Image (spheres, rainbow, N blue to C red):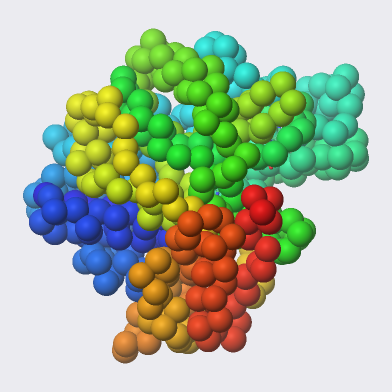
Amino acid sequence: MRVLVLGGGGREHALCWSIAQSPKLERLWCAPGNAGISVVADCVGLDVESAEDVVGFCRREMIDLLVVGPEAPLAAGVSDAAREAGIAVFGPSQAAAMLEISKAFSKEVCVASGAPTAAYGVFDTPDAAKEYLEQHGAPIVVKADGLAAGKGVIVATTMQDAQNAIDSIFDGPGGGRVVMEEMLVGEEASFFVLTDGDTVLPLAGAQDHKRAHDGDTGPNTGGMGAYSPAPAFTAEIECVVMERIVSPVLAEMRARGMPYSGVLYVGLMLTAEGPKVIEFNARFGDPECQCILPRLVTDLLPVLLDCANGTLKDQPLNWKSDSCLTVVMAAQGYPGAYTRGDTISGLDEAGAHADTLIFHAGTKAQDGVTLSNGGRVLGITALGPDITAARNRAYEATDAIQWENGFFRSDIGWRAL
Ligand code: AMP
Ligand code: GLY
């Protein structure tokens, strides 16, 4: 098979690494890719949000399967355009990706399908949102309705913070509409399923660390580390989530004429009353993907193709018994301003152990040297018989990496230990 993966982060490196192991693969491309991905795939400079660019490339190279990593190409309608051109696509339609793109839509689908989620209201003006705030008080969660690159959610502990959050969202890129939501209390976990629209295969649970610094302090990031499986996400909770959330939500999407296919990321709060939906994403988590795929034994590529073609079999996937943990190395300053172009060395030594994988996120290769080229730069990933062993091995690998302006959290996995 000839496969094109869209994206260039750690998630896409993990996807390409996994796909590259398939005996069914003939050739793999990734757009735009990164230095690490270029070892397993041909990196190409396409505009991944341009349907014309992507479909044109797929036609020229006779691509059998398009795998969409991030949400932006979905929101731009690239998956629909490729499907219309007769290309098999792993990734939901633009309409189905509304589960991630619009928080108001995802809440509406939760309510219509009976999936437990926080009580909420949707408002088109700051005044209406503030009236709801007066009625419900703080703490409260204020969310931009649209995609806001991880900056659209404010958990406000005071009335003043909530008012400021409302104002900042109406002035910001997600603008126009806010979702006001009850604050849920509990431990967060993510759960991933694969689906072709009808059949659903549970993938795995994971937990990530969103804050930049140790002790879950500092600003929110895309994720500074993750591990899977997550002990807090028990088999019993998984059953409840499949039954009360995943199945009814996918049925509701079918009933609305927008069947959801691809990977569904269910962001959960494990509350005293049971798991509740925080959000849905129409893609793999990053860095969750990096610590889920190394545990998978089943060949991923045919499963992705089955999701795309509507032929997914109700056959459980096979997994290693190992745990896996990823430590993200980021550029000093991230998630704020940071510099690019620093030399990074020691990567071969760091990844020398068979159970250690160095996934690249923001890197580029230049004259045989690896340079930093983003905020989150590397995902140091290790397998081990339990979380402690995986964590020790991942941190050992970080010792081998020389990068003056890099930083990482030293407490990834603390919740699970
Ligand atoms: P999101 O961008 O939707 O993933 O939200 C970012 C983060 O905000 C989540 O990972 C949670 O930590 C927090 N959050 C979102 N919604 C709620 C909620 N209803 N209650 C408590 N925390 C929330
Ligand atoms: N790690 C969180 C996300 O991918 O949204």
Image spot of residue 81 (x, y percent): 25, 37
Query: From the viewer's perspective, is residue 146 above or below residue 219?
Result: above
Point 31% across, 89% down: residue: 367
In the picture, residue 345 is in which quadrant?
bottom left
Image position of 381 with respect to 269: above or below: below
Asked whether the viewer can see residue 280, the reply is no
Q: Nearer the viewer, residue 260 or 131?
A: 260
84 in relation to 370, above or below: above
Image location (x, y in percent) of residue 148: 58, 45
Relative to 343, 18 lies left or right: left
- Is residue 71 rendered to the left or right of residue 236? left
- Closest to the observer: 190 or 286? 190
Q: Residue at x 51, y 82 (%)?
A: 401
Say which quadrant the C terminus sits in.
Answer: bottom right
Residue 93, image quadrant: top left
- Percent coordinates x, y for residue 49 in the rendering: 35, 49
Q: Is residue 151 left or right of residue 198?
A: right
* Residue 67 vs residue 188, the one in the foreground: 188
Height in image: 111 above or below 200?
A: above
| Label tally | 0
- Which residue shows up at 58% across the image and 36% down it? 233
Image point (55%, 21%), residue name: 240
Question: Residue 407, percent across and down?
Answer: 63, 74
Q: Quadrant of ligand 1?
A: top right
Q: Is residue 313 visible?
A: yes
